[in-house]
Amino acid sequence: MTMRTLPAADPGTPDARSPLRYLWWVARVQGAPMLLGIGMAVLWWLGQALVPAALGRAIDALVAKDVSLLVRWTGVVLALGAVQAVAGVLRHRYAVVTWLSAAYRTVQVTARQAARLGATLPRRLSTGEVVSVGNSDIAQIGNSMDVLLRGSGAFVAIVAVTVILLTTSAPLGLGVLIGVPLMAVAVAPLLRPLHARQHEQRGLQGDLATRAADIVAGLRVLRGIGGEQVFAARYREESQRVRHAGVRVASVESALEGAQILLPGLLIGCVTWMGAHFALEGRISAGQLVAFYGYAVFLIAPLRTLTEVADKLTKGHVAARRVCHILSLEPEMTGAAALPGGGIPGGTLLDQRSGVAVPPGRLTALAAAVPEDAIAIADRLGRYSPGEVTLGGVPLGDLPIAEVRRHILVAENGARLFTGRLRDELDVRGGATDEEMRQALYAACADDVIEALPEGLDGHVAEAGREFSGGQQQRLRLVRALLADPEILILVEPTSAVDAHTEARVAERLAKARAGRTTLVCTTSPLVLDRADLVLYVEDGVVLAEGGHRELLAAEPGYRSTVTRGEG
């Protein structure tokens, strides 16, 4: 039997207005597997629920010494067993389908939202918040969908048993009919504190994941300054807070688990006691007594399933709330819905706040007295932060944001290398030829990095490229930016981690590689500045002077002090 277990490539638009609406959307978009799974669950539970009735009839036939009737009801018991086997297998398969679909559909919409938010995401959410969605929240959302199948079947089975008991003995049927709602009322007070404590624990887990990511990312620095013990102590402190929150959750969950056993046990004990008295009084037969006891034992499972439904739906609600928070965020930067008639304009890229003007087709360098000013200008020019920026006289805000991203590339010094085959990580668009790859490696002086790898470009990149040194990572990031070949390339400190000899070669080759293309390099390196066609000197966030590197060295003391680091 062939069955699709993963959601389609397009997950659709989720309803993130509330956690319940999101869970309903997840259930609705996989309606066919859900309905089929519920149908199989109903058959599976009913197959079990009807066994005591068939067994009681068989016992009555045995007492009456009616062989043909005994054979008939024995066959019914066997048939019900076969129904349970087939329906149970199919129910489980559809349960796996709904679990996977719900979990990975959540991954899809979250990843799509992360790509949509872009630079807004790290400003609004911590790393741990996003990681926790993939680590734990998807499992809770998947469990909430899975338990709906069994819960629906369990409810139908309880209704069926109640009807059978009512038709056989009204007092017994009324006992079950009254007992089940009372169980739900008894369990309800546990759900609110469970929900609150799970929400608190989920937040602490996200904070702890962020702390762990920060420690791993900065481990080399921590060892260099001797800060391992301090951060280890902070991690232990936060870890203990998560543990205590988990214990508080477990205390409520343990009470709920106990209620799952105690309350059905009390109800079953009452039903069995009443049935035994009715049998002694001759109001029911021996077969009916056995059937009643069978119902009593059977009811344990569906009743526990109903309390499990409450528990897992509560956890799913908490997880869905976190997902809805991510999905409710809006990008800080937006643009027009469509391109203007003439397409993306050409011309000068101008930041009006600072006065930085990047002329087309030239290699421009930007030296800022305060490095943060250069980063802020680069973010505005790439439309990663608000600002009055124009391209050829057209405001960037009037252009579609996707087109701005394709036209203008800002390559930050802190950009990451991702896990995967090195060639794929460098050629992110997958269209570079071997010759283009060779030229980009040559321009970034990264040939030796590839030659040192046993598998070359087919080698595997570990997490964040940790097998490479800081200078090697920087050169590989430059290769990636050059292979993207944007119309306008903005590089932020592309040579800060390499030695002077390599920096001189990169400066020379970069100018040749980007000849005739618009390039802005934010740097204070004299070797790079000397290769630029135009140098802009920024002080207090605005352009103070512009010209050639040697010209500014002679005429502008602030520029001279900035690029020579106060030497000479």
Image: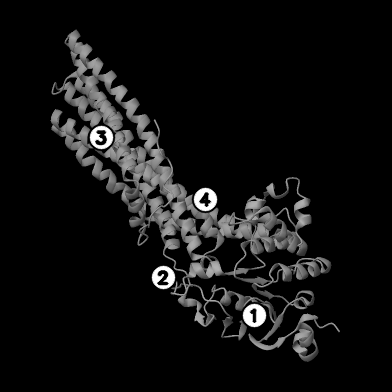
Name the spot of residue 335 as percent of width and height, x first: 45, 73
**Label 3 or label 1, whichever comes before in sequence order:** 3
**Label 4 or label 2, whichever comes before in sequence order:** 4
The residue pinned by badge 3 equals 157
In front: label 1 or label 2: 2
Mark 3 residue element = helix
Name the spot of residue 536 as percent of width and height, x first: 69, 83
Q: What is the three-letter code of the residue carrying label 1?
A: Asp
Mark 1 residue element = helix
Q: Residue furthest right?
A: 568
Mark 4 residue element = helix
In three-dimensional space, the C-alpha distance between marks 3 and 2, rounded to whole angstroms, equals: 53 Å
The residue pinned by badge 2 equals 337
The residue pinned by badge 4 equals 135
**Label 3 or label 2, whichever comes before in sequence order:** 3
In three-dimensional space, the C-alpha distance between marks 4 and 2, rounded to whole angstroms, equals: 35 Å
**Is there CB contact under 8 Å for labels 3 and 2?**
no
Q: Is residue 196 left or right of residue 280?
A: right
Question: Where does the N terminus fall, quadrant-wise?
Answer: top left
Task: Work out whether residue 265 can be spotted.
Answer: no
Above or below, comparing residue 533 to residue 190 in the picture: below
- Locate residue 415: give its quadrant: bottom right
**Label 2 neighbour load within 10 Å: few <14, some 14-19, many 20+:** few
Name the spot of residue 364 as percent of width and height, x first: 68, 78
**Label 4 or label 3, whichever comes before in sequence order:** 4
Q: What is the three-letter code of the residue carrying label 3?
A: Ala
**Label 1 or label 2, whichever comes before in sequence order:** 2
Q: Residue at x 35, y 30 (%)?
A: 88
Task: Work out whether residue 145 can be spotted.
Answer: yes
Q: Residue at x 75, y 86 (%)?
A: 559
Above or below, comparing residue 551 to residue 408 in the picture: below
